[in-house]
Structures are given as C-alpha cells and as structure tokens.
Image: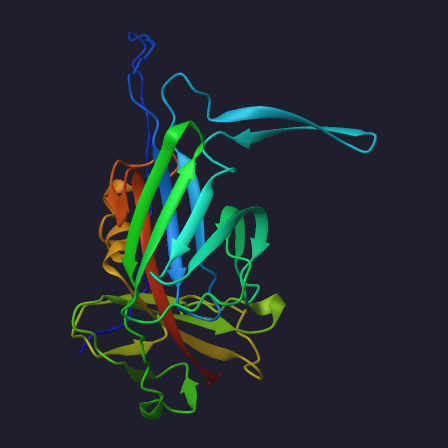
C-alpha cells in the first residue's frame, strides 16, 4: 500500500570567488531561440496558456528601462527582455484553429491563479478531449518559429463511492482512483477554510502516481500546529487528481530537479518536450476533484 507524502524541493546555490582570482569578460556565439511554456487544459477550471520567451546572448541585458507617460504622470520601470509580447500564437486540434492573444495580467477561470505575460484564448469554445492531438505554432519577429504537439491525457477519476462523507483528521483513509496504463498522475490535498485561516499544517500534500497505481493511504502528517487549530465548523478537505501527458511529466517532474531553475525556465535549459525549433514544453493536463468535511 502506498502513502501520500508531502513533496518538498529546495534549491541551494552559492558562489565563492577566492581573493586571488579576477573576473573575465565572457563572450558567446550563442544564437537566440524561442523558449516556450505551453499548456492545454481539458479541465473547465484551468486555463490553457502559452508563454513565449527567448534566450539571450551574453551581451544582452535581461531587463530594459521603459519610460511611460500616463496623463501628466511619468512612470519609469524595468521590463524583461526574455518575454516576447508580439508573437503570433495559434493552437489547433486539426479541425479548428484558436488564436491566443498576449495579456500582461489575467486570473484563472476559478480566480485562484494569476497569469502574467502570457498568451490566452479569449473565446469559450476551446474544448480539448482525451486522445486528441493538439498542435502549437508560434512565429515571432526576427524569423523565430516554433511548432509543438501534445496528446490530451485520459480523464482522471477519483472513486468517490469508496470515500467517507467526512475525514477525521487524526485517522487515515484509503483514496483510490482509476489507474492509467501509460500516463502519470498527480494527486494533491488542500485545506479550504476561512480566508484568515487558509492553512492547516499537515493537510496540504502531494503525491506522484505511476502508471498502474490505483490507491494510496492518506493521513494528516505530523506537525506542531500550536494554538492555530481551526474550529472545524466549515473546513473542507479537497483532493485534486491530475493526469498529464508525457511532455508535461518530463518537463515539470522527471527533469525538474536537475534541469530547470523555475517552472518558466527564463533563458531555457536547452531541453525541449513536445517542441520543435526551440526549447521548452508543450503539454496537456486534465483534473478531477472531490471534497469532504473535516472533523476532529
């Protein structure tokens, strides 16, 4: 029997320069290329998006200074040179094409996630289905062009009929789901309570599910909660089960610890998953959810 545990990844880095060494100028003949983060979501509460970046050579600054006048006020700020804001981004299912447009800021469908400097589809007819092949085509100034392909993963399913109506926080329960032959899944748990008490230690957990796995034991992890225990009157335990295509799994999970410094990989790592003509990832996901009341 498997157990659901918290997954915590910490990155540490340091740089020590002995006093007898001197800095030297570094030059490179590296050619800039596109770095794509594209996600097609078959979940009604998660927004599909594409982020278009480019790598920089050693002589380019990562930021540029912008002077903007709004009314009688002058604003001076820095903007990232990694981000490409004037690309043409088209996603297709082989029948219809969907044009994604650049936005500086937007909220996800259920308002719990914020997007910055990404391309989004503004229509309401984007409806990916399991097994479909979706493609990406990005063209940008200076001759940049990238294509991508993803296969929408199977729909995940939590077997809710096997779960109790309430979760007693000092006990454990078995959570089961529809196993998948080839696709990895990820299940996480979260505590939903009043805004002023949105975190309950030991409840938020995450577990990667290998193909063929069908269940795990969930229990609240031991922690020193002190005096911050909630009243339990309206506290909810939420499970989210996400299936993912191979591209998403490889980029964000399989190689994330050794290859990428962040999920958006500014500047890129040199790897590509589902991307041709550049680096990055074009993947897809879908999600199932279930919630229950927590009791002491």
Residue name at image x 41 percent, y 39 percent: 139
Is residue 240 in view?
A: no
Q: Position of residue 34 (x, y in %)?
A: 36, 36
Q: Is residue 22 above or below residue 84?
A: above
In the foreground, 88 or 179: 88
- The N terminus - image quarter: bottom left
Q: Is residue 93 above or below residue 218?
A: above
Q: Position of residue 170 (x, y in %)?
A: 38, 81
Residue name at image x 80 percent, y 30 percent: 73
In the foreground, 249 or 280: 280
* Count of numbered circles in the view: 0
Q: Is residue 78 above or below residue 191?
A: above
In the foreground, 176 or 106: 106
Residue lying at the far front of the rendered structure: 95
Residue name at image x 52 percent, y 52 percent: 115
Is residue 259 in view?
A: yes
Query: Does residue 83 appear to the left or right of 1 in the view shown?
Result: right
Q: Is residue 195 above or below residue 173?
A: above
**Which color scheme does this rendered protein use?**
rainbow
Query: Does residue 68 appear to the left or right of 277 in the view shown?
Result: right
Picture quadrant of residue 75? top right
Q: Position of residue 250 (x, y in %)?
A: 23, 53
In the foreground, 242 or 171: 242
Q: Position of residue 246 (x, y in %)?
A: 23, 58
């Amino acid at each position: 029997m498997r157990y659901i545990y918290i997954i915590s990844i910490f990155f540490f880095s340091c740089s020590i320069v002995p006093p007898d060494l001197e800095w030297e100028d570094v030059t490179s003949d590296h050619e800039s290329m596109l770095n794509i983060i594209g996600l097609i979501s078959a979940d009604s509460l998660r927004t599909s998006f594409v982020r278009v970046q480019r790598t920089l050579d050693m002589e380019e600054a990562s930021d540029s200074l912008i002077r903007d006048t709004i009314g009688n006020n002058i604003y001076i700020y820095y903007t990232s040179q990694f981000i490409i804001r004037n690309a043409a981004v088209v996603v297709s299912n082989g029948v219809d094409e969907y044009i994604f447009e650049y936005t500086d800021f937007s909220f996800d469908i259920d308002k719990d996630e914020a997007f910055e400097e990404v391309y989004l589809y503004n229509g309401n007819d984007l409806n990916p289905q399991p097994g479909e092949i979706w493609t990406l085509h990005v063209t940008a100034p200076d001759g940049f062009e990238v294509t991508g392909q993803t296969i929408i993963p199977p729909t995940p399913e939590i077997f809710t009929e096997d779960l109790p109506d309430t979760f007693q926080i000092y006990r454990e329960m078995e959570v089961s789901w529809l196993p998948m032959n080839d696709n990895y899944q990820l299940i996480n748990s979260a505590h939903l309570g009043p805004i002023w008490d949105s975190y309950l230690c030991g409840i938020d957990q995450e577990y990667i599910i290998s193909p063929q796995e069908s269940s795990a034991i969930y229990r609240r992890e031991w922690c020193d909660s002190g005096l911050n225990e909630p009243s339990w009157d309206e506290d909810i335990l939420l499970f989210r089960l996400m299936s993912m295509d191979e591209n998403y799994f490889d980029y964000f999970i399989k190689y994330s610890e050794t290859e990428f410094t962040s999920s958006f990989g500014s500047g890129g790592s040199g790897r590509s998953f589902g991307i041709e003509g550049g680096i990055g990832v074009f993947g897809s996901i879908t999600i199932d959810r279930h919630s229950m009341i927590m009791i002491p």
